[in-house]
Every structure is written in structure tokens, then in C-alpha cells.
Image (cartoon, grey):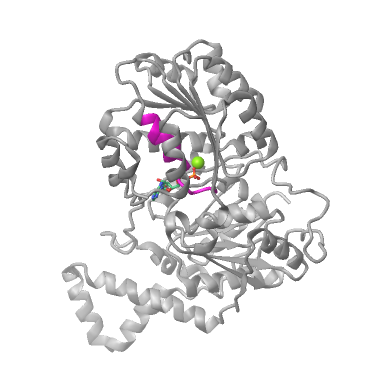
């Protein structure tokens, strides 16, 4: 469906166009008209299906520009999601000068209070704890709020925010509309719907429509000790634009990150033990294309919104099939194709079957590439890097080039250059501490835990970042091109790189 068919105003249509949205996503097509009419809506659709704009556009359209009060409040489970939502609404509302502010814990409350006072927002986005904090201090006033949005409701449930949400809803006592969005819809969430919503319209978009079909899902059978080398070879052959590697534990993420870096890949990791600032800066680099590989735990990556992820590597198969869906949902977003590769050790086959039952799709077996294939992949990249470099102005190198040509053949020089760029670092030994294998699980029927998507304690932080990546890899003036820094490590590659466990 076209956005122009929804009756949105010109300023919004312009902003949508600027965002590069061509058509509505299914959840947008169904919920926007209902929300515009002022109805209460419960919208369920997978992560990455554009739920933010689904509630954001109707809110922006219905703003009363004359009223200098908070007219809509959006509750988000995490700081990252709150920030991301604020950014998206700000972008969409820019032409109408919509005032959108965000409040979240961990940031200086004094500053927030000052800025709320100086500039009362029309739309306020926040995490539950911080919103309540402001309400108790009377530094925000929700009496004129028309619309309350409970976004990512399942996450808020997981994190134990239900009570807080109910309190916030009570402060917004003149509300006319409640919108609830979630990727899954467990019972307690529907209960909130019953309690706080009037005759809500329920819109449910089946998971398959957007994601799974666009993702080619593969698995590699490998022993624990083989996984790292195989993954490196896969990366060399598949040449992902942007990849996310999932590890089961924080230690795993640290080790994989250091191992990938030692082999010359442009990788960085995020997990819950890192400071907020650190996580944000890693995500920012990834989003800007300055980082090729993001290594993450489930917790750190939930809800992450990064467009352009081409490959997801499940270094460890998730024990929870819902996590699998979340993970591979990092790719194949908003209509683009993606690929996932899941490593499965022999005793983990049962987990794979469970996942396949949930996704209703079989993963295809993938044969690990050989060393030679991996080298071919690296050389292919090196060649394209050389072609990029040749586009630059190289005149200042000509003198030395001539000098080299007098002493060596052109063939040898080019070969040396290729060798340098391709950095065959497969000889850099990386040892990843084996994780305790998942408990053996029979033929794929789920174990004792029910459909346990919830309450398994991911003390959850979602990293969240937005699209609009600029792909400038390979065109940097100063020659720090994407994967090139691989070459720089060659000098040290004679030493084996063994990862030490910090806390073991
Ligand atoms: N109609 C659309 N077409 C293309 N991209 C879209 C569309 N709607 C939203 N997006 C983009 O898709 C990404 C995911 O949207 P988001 O609202 O975070 O998803 P969700 O909340 O469902 O997980 C964002 O980068 C957003 O800007
Ligand atoms: Mg969302």
C-alpha cells in the first residue's frame, strides 16, 4: 500500500519520502488507519516491521500545534529503544517542527528537568522508571495526553515493568487512545489491553510475511573446536557487507571479537557488561559502516535496528527458538534479502529441530569452505580494493613506483600488493574457550519449559540504531579502507594469538 492512500498530511508524506520508505509495511497498512480514527489498537508484528512509524505517523498527524502540552507519551523498555524512537519521530515530524523529547534512566535528571521546562514537548518518549520519576517530581504533566503508546510490550513484560506502566497510565487520566505494539503477544499483555483499552482492534501480522522468507537459513555441522576457523573461512567466501555474529555468553563475545580482530577483521563486540557509552559508540560505528562485523549476545542485540545487515552468524545456536527468530531478524529487514548461518555441534541437533518447528522452515546444510576457497575470497576482495585505489589520484606515488619497477618485475610487485591486502591470516591461531554444551535434547521436542519466550531473565538491553548507513567502504581518502587494516597485522602474525580468559 502507498503511504499517500492513508490520508496523511503533505509534511508527513514528504518526511516518509525522505526516509526512503516506498510502501507501507503490513502492520502500518492495517494499524495507521485505525489509529488515525482514534481507535485503541493492539498491533503484533515481528521486530523490524516498522511499528514505530505505525504509531508515530498517526500521533504526528493528530498533534495540536497550538497546545503547548504533552499530547502523546510513548513508553519503551530500554534507553536505546527510547532514543531510537525519539529519533525516528523527530525525523518524521521535522517539517512540522514537532517537539519530541526523550527521557531515560542513567542520564542526568537535572538536565532533563531543565530541558523539559524550557521546551515542553508535544511527544514524550521514555523508559518506565524515568517517566515515573519525573511524574513523582511533577516535572512532567500528562493530564493533556491524548495517546499513550506501550511499545515493545513483550519486552516490558519481560523486564518486569507492568506495574510501572499501569502507574503511568493512571497519570495520563484524560487519555483518549492507547496503542500497544509488540512482537509477541503473551497473555499478561492482552490483560493490560483488557484493563486499559476500550474495545481495542487487534491487528496481527504473521511472522513469515516479512522476515523468514527473505532470509536464506543455513546450518553448518561442526565440532566446538572447529567453529572459529570455519566461521572465518565463511566470512572470507561470503564477503558480508555487514555481519552480526552471535555468541552465547559475554566471554564468548569478548573472545570472538578479539579473535576476529587478530585475524584482521574489522570487528567489535557488545554485551551487557559494557558501559552504555561504549555500546552506543560500537553501534554507531557499525551503523556508519566503519565496522564490518558486530559480535553480540542476545541481550545486547535485541530489537537492534540496523539496516543493511547481510549476514547473521550464530556462532552458538540459541537454546531458545524465539531468540533464533530475533537473531536472524537482524537481517532481511524491510524487504531486503539476508542470510543466516547457524553452527550446530553434534549434540545440538535437537535444538535445531525445535527451531525449525517454530519457523516452519528447514535450514539448508552448508559445507564449510576449504582454505583455498577462503583464500580465493580474500583475493577477490583484495582485487576490488586495488580497483578502488586505482580510482584515486596516485601521482605522488609515481617516483617510488618507478624505483620499485626498476628493481622488480611488475608481476612480483602486484603479487606482493595482493598478498599484503588479502592478509592470509588463517595461520594466526585463535583459541576460543569451549562453552559448556547445551544439555542434550532428544529429537527436538521442547523440554520442560513451556513456550518459554519470557522470563528467562535477559536483564535486557536492546541496542538500537537506525538505518541510513552510508556505505563508503573503500573510498576513504586516507586509505583506511574497510578491511585493509588486516594487512597491517601481518607483521605480528608470526606470533600465535591465543585469547586469555580474563575471568575464568
Ligand atoms: N514502510 C517502510 N519501508 C521501509 N523501511 C521502513 C518502513 N517503515 C519503517 N521502516 C524502517 O524499518 C526499520 C525498522 O523499523 P522499526 O519501527 O524499528 O521496527 P519494529 O519496531 O517493528 O521492530 C527502521 O529503520 C525504519 O525506519
Ligand atoms: Mg519497535
Image side of residue 318 versus residue 407, left or right:
right
Residue shown at the point (59%, 52%) measured from the top left:
326
Q: Taking the image as drawn, is residue 481 in sight? A: yes
Image side of residue 415 versus residue 257, left or right:
left
Residue shown at the point (37%, 75%) measured from the top left:
382
Using the image, determine if residue 220 lies above or below residue 322.
below
Q: Is residue 182 magenta?
A: no
Give residue 194's position: percent from left, percent from top: 64, 28
Using the image, determine if residue 117 lies above or below residue 89.
above
Q: Taking the image as drawn, is residue 465 in sight? A: no
Instruction: Work out whether residue 264 or residue 268 is closer to the camera in this orientation and state it.
Output: 268
Give residue 301's position: percent from left, percent from top: 56, 48
Instruction: Work out whether residue 177 or residue 122 is closer to the camera in this orientation and state it.
Output: 177
Image side of residue 122 versus residue 138, left or right:
left
Q: Which residues are magenta?
A: 46-60
Image side of residue 417 versus residue 307, left or right:
left
Instruction: Work out whether residue 157 or residue 247 is closer to the camera in this orientation and state it.
Output: 157
Amino acid at each position: 500500500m502507498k503511504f499517500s492512500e492513508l490520508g496523511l498530511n503533505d509534511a508527513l508524506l514528504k518526511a516518509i519520502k525522505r526516509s526512503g520508505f516506498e510502501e507501507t509495511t503490513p502492520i502500518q497498512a492495517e494499524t495507521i488507519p485505525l489509529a488515525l480514527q482514534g481507535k485503541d489498537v493492539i498491533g503484533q508484528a515481528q521486530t523490524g516491521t516498522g511499528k514505530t512509524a505505525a504509531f508515530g505517523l498517526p500521533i504526528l498527524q493528530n498533534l495540536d500545534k497550538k497546545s503547548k502540552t504533552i499530547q502523546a507519551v510513548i513508553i519503551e523498555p530500554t534507553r536505546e529503544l527510547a532514543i531510537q524512537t525519539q529519533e525516528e519521530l523527530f525525523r518524521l515530524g521535522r517539517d512540522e517542527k514537532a517537539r519530541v523529547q526523550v527521557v531515560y534512566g542513567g542520564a542526568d535528571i537535572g538536565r532533563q528537568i531543565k530541558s523539559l521546562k524550557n521546551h515542553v514537548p508535544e511527544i514524550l518518549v521514555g523508559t518506565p522508571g524515568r517517566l515515573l520519576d519525573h511524574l513523582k517530581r511533577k516535572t512532567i504533566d500528562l493530564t493533556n495526553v491524548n495517546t499513550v503508546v506501550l511499545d515493545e510490550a513483550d519486552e516490558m513484560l519481560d523486564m518486569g515493568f507492568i506495574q510501572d506502566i499501569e502507574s503511568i497510565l493512571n497519570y495520563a487520566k484524560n487519555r483518549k487512545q492507547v496503542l500497544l505494539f509488540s512482537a509477541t503477544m503473551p497473555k499478561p499483555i492482552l490483560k493490560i489491553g483488557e484493563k486499559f483499552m476500550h474495545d481495542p482492534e487487534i491487528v496481527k501480522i504473521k511472522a513469515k510475511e516479512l522476515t523468514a522468507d527473505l532470509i536464506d537459513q543455513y546450518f553448518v555441522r561442526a565440532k566446538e573446536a572447529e567453529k572459529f576457523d570455519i566461521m572465518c573461512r565463511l566470512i572470507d567466501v561470503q564477503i558480508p557487507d555487514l555481519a552480526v555474529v552471535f555468541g552465547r555468553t559475554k566471554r564468548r563475545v569478548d573472545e570472538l571479537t578479539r579473535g576476529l580482530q587478530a585475524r584482521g577483521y574489522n570487528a567489535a563486540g557488545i554485551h551487557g557488561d559494557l558501559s552504555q557509552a561504549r555500546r552506543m559508540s560500537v553501534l554507531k560505528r557499525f551503523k556508519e559502516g566503519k565496522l564490518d562485523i558486530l559480535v553480540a549476545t542476545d541481550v545486547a542485540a535485541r530489537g537492534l535496528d540496523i539496516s543493511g545487515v547481510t549476514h547473521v552468524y550464530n556462532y552458538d545456536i540459541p537454546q531458545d527458538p524465539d531468540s533464533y527468530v530475533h537473531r536472524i531478524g537482524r537481517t532481511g529487514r524491510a524487504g531486503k534479502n539476508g542470510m543466516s548461518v547457524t553452527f550446530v555441534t553434534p549434540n545440538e541437533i535437537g535444538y535445531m529441530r525445535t527451531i525449525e518447528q517454530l519457523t516452519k522452515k528447514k535450514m539448508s546444510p552448508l559445507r564449510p569452505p576449504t582454505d583455498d576457497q577462503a583464500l580465493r575470497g580474500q583475493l577477490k576482495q583484495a582485487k576490488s580494493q586495488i580497483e578502488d585505489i586505482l580510482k584515486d589520484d596516485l601521482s605522488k606515488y609515481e617516483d617510488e613506483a618507478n624505483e620499485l619497477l626498476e628493481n622488480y618485475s611488475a608481476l612480483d610487485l602486484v603479487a606482493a600488493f595482493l598478498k599484503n591486502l588479502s592478509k592470509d591470516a588463517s595461520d594466526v591461531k585463535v583459541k576460543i574457550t569451549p562453552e559448556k554444551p547445551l544439555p542434550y535434547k532428544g529429537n527436538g521436542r521442547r523440554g520442560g519449559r513451556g513456550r518459554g519466550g519470557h522470563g528467562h531473565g535477559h536483564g535486557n538491553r536492546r541496542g538500537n540504531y537506525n538505518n541510513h548507513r552510508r556505505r563508503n567502504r573503500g573510498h576513504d581518502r586516507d586509505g583506511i579502507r574497510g578491511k585493509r587494516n588486516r594487512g597491517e597485522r601481518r607483521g605480528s602474525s608470526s606470533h600465535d594469538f591465543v585469547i586469555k580468559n580474563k575471568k575464568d
